[in-house]
Amino acid sequence: MSMIPPLPQTLPPPPGFQIGHWLKGDWHMHCRHSTDSTNNPQSRIIGFAERLGFDYLAITDHDVHVQGAVAGHTWADPEYHSDSVLLFYGAELTAPRGHVNILSAEPYDHQRVFDARNARDWDLLRLKQDLGIHWSANHPHHKNHYGFSFDLADSVEIWNTSVWSKNVPNLRIWDDQLLSGRMIGARGGSDNHHGIPDDPALIVPLTMEGTANYVGTPTTWVFATTRSKSAILAALEQGRASISSNPYNPRVELYADHDGDGVMNMMMGDNARPTGGRVDFEVRLAGGGIPGAAYQVRVIRNREEFGHFVTDAATRSVRFSDTPPADARSYYRVEIEGPQAPYPEVPNSMAQSLNMVALSNPIYFNYDPDF
């Protein structure tokens, strides 16, 4: 019986992760070039990110607010520069069928994307390929839900803003896509719109949002081969990434020993043929967090809960094992719950994130990379 997508007969060995850089950033933000933003010039956003040591940012203003001319507004703004933060070119495609973050390492013709926003998906796929852009599905479960085909998506925003409760349905939507045989890298995005002005006279009712949702709520960590925009986008698409509710919380990393030699040789985003034997997995929490805290680790296998574990307070790690079947697809991902690390620069964000600390991308077995 054939499967769509089919099970691969062979797969290349996992690429390894001996060389690379963990880089942190935010994929979804709005500055003053979005008309629903207040007190949020690019200088404030970028300066904030520079002070906190962020590596990359994507300022993605609503293209509909400038009729697609983001190149003449967001990108042309003299404040759009940084000596330490890698700044992506992009915009939030704002269409009747939903919102999409278009991302690129270099300038591209966004006007063509905006003008084609209501085209058929197969025409949008050709346009995406022609422009060489990254297509990221925004907040799938939202009043402005993602209504385009997920076969267009290079990544999906499963964690939007600091408010964790409204993101729970996004996980089900993502899990549905993964279970269907699609490998779609997950990311976060603060979707922040509002800054806190230096002059109290400029405070508006929405200013309070800037104390609860700003750069890094959540933070997406990407494992890139080099500290370059092209490498970051490649890693995001591959799923070599995880998400933390804020930059002071630990980064979750998921690894696996695919061949039973006692050495972890797979990480998030990797895909391999099962050997038929046991696979050992390791969850690691790196940096940040609450010293001595015990974090809850929830393992998801094929959309269902596989197990629930508690990290060792000293190593902040957990190990578990399973035997992925040779005649079926399997994926494994983890969710981390526990106390929120304080984010003093955005003090009201922790309460909004509840006890959700971090999420990983999956490790895959028997997925067809050409589907």
Image (tube, rainbow, N blue to C red):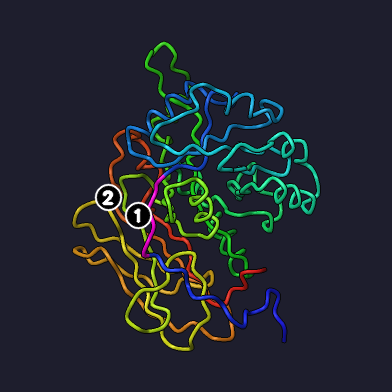
User: Which of disc 1 and disc 2 is earlier in sequence?
Assistant: 1
Asked if residue 39 is among those painted magenta in the image, a careful observer would answer: no
Which of the numbered marks, if any, corresponds to residue 195? Answer: none
Tell me if mark 2 has few (under 14), some (14-19) or many (20+) residues whose alpha carbon lies within 10 angstroms of its own.
Answer: some
In the image, is 290 to the left or to the right of 268?
A: left
> In the rendered image, which quarter contains the C terminus?
bottom right
In the image, is 82 to the left or to the right of 366?
A: left
In the image, is 187 to the left or to the right of 351?
A: right
Residue 126 x, y percent position in the rendering: 76, 51
Q: Residue at 41%, 85% (x, y): give it.
A: 278
Q: Is residue 179 above or below residue 349?
A: below
Residue 303 x, y percent position in the rendering: 53, 69
Q: Residue at 34%, 67% (x, y): give it.
A: 283
| 291 and 134: which is toward the camera | 134
Q: Is residue 168 above or below residue 79?
A: below
Residue 331 x, y percent position in the rendering: 51, 72
Q: Secondary structure at mark 1?
A: strand
Disc 2 to disc 1: CB gap under 8 Å:
yes
Residue 314 x, y percent position in the rendering: 18, 64
Asked if residue 19 is among those painted magenta in the image, a careful observer would answer: yes
| 167 and 2: which is toward the camera | 2
Q: Is residue 308 above or below residue 63?
A: below
Q: Amino acid at mark 2?
A: Gly
Q: Disc count in the image?
A: 2
Q: Amino acid at mark 1?
A: Arg
* Magenta range: 18-24
Specify the quadrant of the image occupied by residue 255: bottom left
Q: Residue at 36%, 53% (x, y): give it.
A: 357
Please give the residue where the numbered disc 1 appears in the rendered image: 251
Q: Secondary structure at mark 2?
A: loop
Q: Residue at 37%, 84% (x, y): give it.
A: 260
Which of the numbered marks, if any, corresponds to residue 288? Answer: 2
